[in-house]
Amino acid sequence: MSKYLLELAAARVKGSPFGITSVCSAHPVVLRAAVRRARVTESHVLIEATCNQVNHLGGYTGMTPADFVDLVGKIADEEGLRRDLVIFGGDHLGPNPWRKQRAEEALSKARDMVRAYVAAGFSKIHIDTSMGCAGEPIALGDRTIAGRAADLCAIAEETAKAVGLPMPVYILGTEVPVPGGADHVLDTVEPTSPDAARATIGIHREIFEAAGLGDAFERVLAFVVQPGVEFGSENVIVYDPPKAVSLAAVLQDDDRLVFEAHSTDYQPEEALASLVKDGFAILKVGPGLTFAYREALYALDMIASELAPSYGARPLAATMEKLMLEHPDDWQGHYHGDEAALRLQRHYSYSDRIRYYWNRPEAAAAVDALAKALEGRRIPEPLLRQYLPQYALTDASGMQDILIAAVDEVLGVYDRAARPDAV
C-alpha cells in the first residue's frame, strides 16, 4: 500500500504529477463517504488518525489505533471496498497530546503511541516533534526536533520488524500549520523559505544517518512545509502559485520527495490542482469534511422542524449549543469576540471546533432524534430547494444519503484536483 504513495514522487519527476487526498477524520460518516468514493473510483484511499483523536490511551474518540483500523475495516467490508486499497496514516505522532508534561515523560508516551500505530498496520507515519514540552521553549531548534524524530522513527522500525509488517514510509518536517486552522483572522500566510526547507531536510538526513536510520530515511516520502495556505475562523487564504515557486523548486534537489500540504480545507478546486502540479502531492483535509457534515445536519434539523411539528424548533442546534456551553474546553481560546460572535463561531466557524462534540452521548441522541423525525417521510422538493438545493433534483433524499453526499461533494473536489480521471 505504501508503494502507491512512493509513486507520487516518480510521477512528479516524469512530469505527470498526481496527488492523493489525506482524509483526516475519525467521524464515521466521513469515513464511510471516503470509503464509498474509493469503491466507486476503484482507487486507494488514504485515511489518517491524529495523535489527539486516536492513541494508545484512547484519545478523545476513545479509540486505540487498532480500534480505528477495525472501524475503517468494517466500513470497507460493508461498502464493498477491498481492504488492501485502504492506506492508514498516523498524523502528528509525537509528544503533542502530553506537551504539558516534562519532555522525558511526554516522549515516553509518544514512543508507546508510535508502537501502537505501527503494530496496528498504519504504514504512513507523520512524525511531529516540533512542539516544546513543559519547561522548554515553544519553538524548538531543528536539531532537537530531528533528534526526537529519529528516536520515534527507530521505534517505528523496530515495531514493524517485530510484528512482520512492511516497513513504513515517513513524513517529516517542522513547518506544520496550526492543527485545525488558525484562531484569528488572517490576511496572508508566507510560504516556507527555500533555505529553511533545505536546512530541515539536510539536518534530518544527517541525524537519521548518524542514528543508523539511513534505510528509514530512504523511505521518507515527504516533508511538511507551508505552501501559503491556511484558514481562520471566518476566512481562507487561497494558494498563490507564484509565491511558492522557489519553495517548489526545492524538490528538484531530491527525486524521491514530494511535499505534504496541511490545512488545505476550503481551498477552491483550481488551487488544489495547482498545489498538486507544484509538488504538494499530499493534500490534507479534516475540518472541511466535518464542516460539510454539520452544514447538512443543520439543514436537515430545519427541514424536520418544518415537516414534523412535534420535533420542535431546531432541537439539534439547541443541543449542540448547550453541550458547547457546558463543556467549553474544545472551543474556548480558539474563538474570540462578544457573546453574539462567539455563538456564531461555535456553530459556523471554518475551524469547526464543533466536530469535537459529535461523539458525545447527548449529540448522538440528538442526531438519532433527527433521524427518527425524518424516518419514512418524503422531503418535498420545494423544501429541499429551500435548505439543501443541491439535492433537490438528485436521488439523495434520505438523511444518511444526504450526509454522505455532502461530505462526498468535498471529496470530489479533492479527487478532481489530485487525479483528473477521478469520478
Image (cartoon, rainbow, N blue to C red):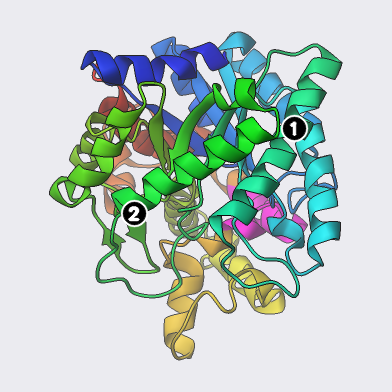
Q: Position of residue 68 (x, y in %)?
A: 73, 33
Q: Position of residue 96 (x, y in %)?
A: 68, 57
Q: Which residue is mark 2?
A: 192
> Label for residue 154?
1
Image point (41%, 51%), residue name: 263
Q: Nearer the viewer, residue 79 or 266?
A: 266
**In the image, which residues are magenta?**
355-370
Q: Position of residue 328 (x, y in %)?
A: 66, 76
Please tell me whether residue 134 is drawn above or below residue 66 in the rendered image: below
Image point (80%, 16%), residue name: 161
The number of numbered badges drawn on the structure is 2
Please tell me whether residue 119 is drawn above or below residue 140 in the rendered image: above
Please tell me whether residue 140 is drawn above or below residue 2 in the rendered image: below
Q: Position of residue 384 (x, y in %)?
A: 33, 45
What amino acid type should be assigned to the residue bearing mark 2?
Answer: Thr
Tell me if mark 1 has few (under 14), some (14-19) or many (20+) residues whose alpha carbon lies within 10 angstroms of its own.
some
Image point (79%, 52%), residue name: 107
Q: Is residue 78 left or right of residue 268?
A: right
Tell me if mark 2 has few (under 14), some (14-19) or many (20+) residues whose alpha carbon lies within 10 angstroms of its own.
some
